[in-house]
Amino acid sequence: MYHRGYARNLDDWRVEAYPVGPAHLLDELAGTLHRGPRWSGVCGVEEREAAVKTGGGFRSE
């Protein structure tokens, strides 16, 4: 399955993610973002809805 979006590191140490996909996969990703990867320190997650952009993408399997 192929979905669109991006993730990037910001200069202030935050990470910005813009995922596009089915609601159930976005919910799953949100849960992962709140936990963060092993050895990370997640201080908070801000979620906002945004208009769908067109452009590059990444693979989600």
Image (cartoon, rainbow, N blue to C red):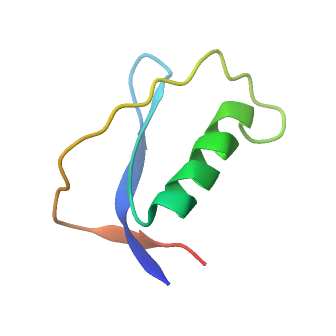
42 and 49: which is toward the camera: 49
**Residue 24 rendering spot, x and y as whole percentages:** 55, 61
**Which residue lies at the image location 83% right of the left edge and 33% below the top edge?**
39
Asked if 17 appears above or below 48 in the picture, the reply is below
Residue at 71% x, 37% y: name it. Answer: 36
Is 37 placed above or below 21 here?
Answer: above
Look at the image and tell me in which quarter the C terminus lies: bottom right
Q: Is residue 3 left or right of residue 45?
A: left
Nearest the camera: 16 or 10?
A: 16
Q: Tell me residue 20's x, y (percent).
A: 36, 60
Question: Taking 3 as reference, is 16 above or below it?
Answer: above
Picture residue at 55% right of the left edge, 62% below the top? 25
Residue farthest to the bottom?
A: 1
Residue 2 placed where, x, y %?
43, 80
Task: Give the tally of numbered discs.
Answer: 0
> Where 31 sits versus 21, above or below?
above
Q: Is residue 56 left or right of residue 32?
A: left
**Residue 6, percent across and down?**
37, 54
Image-based side of 6 in relation to 36, left or right: left
- Most extreme residue toward the front, as rendered? 23
- Residue at 57 percent across and 50 percent down: it is 27
